[in-house]
Amino acid sequence: MRHTDMKPQTWLGRLAPWVAALLGLAALWIWADRLLPGGETPMHSVAPEACDLNQQACTVDLADDGRLTLDLRPRPIPTLRPVEVRLEMSGRDPDWVELDLAGVEMFMGLNRARLERVAPGQFRGEIVVPVCVSESMTWAATLLPEGDEARSEVQFHFVTRR
């Protein structure tokens, strides 16, 4: 039997496992690149139990002797009203910082605020925290120097209540 005499079903049947294997390898490569630790800076996560932004400003010591303090006001943090964001950084001084606010339990849409530099290492801005249908919602506030997720080192978690 010559190759040209092969039926299309037989040819596709032989090719399908190879295509599936290549797609599986590509998916594994993407998954590993996104989820496995690499050379990037590790994310420091601050839980509400460690420091509650509803009660006080929270400070984190960074790996390279830097320090970062985040303060959200008013307290407790309201929903659907402007929240003043104050950020102080030592050891680094980007031109601006973004605060990315994401729901932990569910996707609540894209919510980013740009914090403007008001003095060396000091940033100010405001953000509106969306309201959730559930009684309480845990939020992750990630600080992105100059909007660059790769430079992000700290994520603060806090809870809002209806």
Image (cartoon, helix red, strand yellow):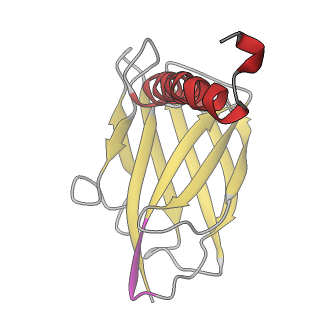
Q: Examine the image and state in which quarter residue 52 appears.
A: bottom left
* Residue sitting at x 67%, y 49%: 124
- Left or right: residue 68 versus residue 19 is left
- Left or right: residue 19 versus residue 117 is left
Q: Nearer the viewer, residue 117 or 137?
A: 137
* Residue sitting at x 43%, y 44%: 155
Q: Nearer the viewer, residue 14 or 67?
A: 14
Q: Position of residue 71 (x, y in %)?
A: 49, 55
**Count of labels in the image:** 0
Q: Position of residue 110 (x, y in %)?
A: 68, 59
102 vs 32: above or below:
below
Q: Position of residue 23 (x, y in %)?
A: 56, 28
The chief SS type of the magenta part is strand
Q: Residue furthest front?
A: 1
Q: Examine the image and state in which quarter residue 75 appears.
A: bottom left
Is 125 within the magenta? Answer: no
* Residue sitting at x 60%, y 24%: 15
Q: Over which residues does the magenta segment extend?
A: 134-138
* Residue sitting at x 74%, y 19%: 5
- Left or right: residue 116 versus residue 155 is right
Q: Quadrant of the N terminus?
A: top right
Q: Quadrant of the C terminus?
A: bottom left
135 vs 12: above or below:
below
143 vs 146: above or below:
below
Q: Examine the image and state in which quarter residue 96 appears.
A: top right
Q: Position of residue 66 (x, y in %)?
A: 42, 22
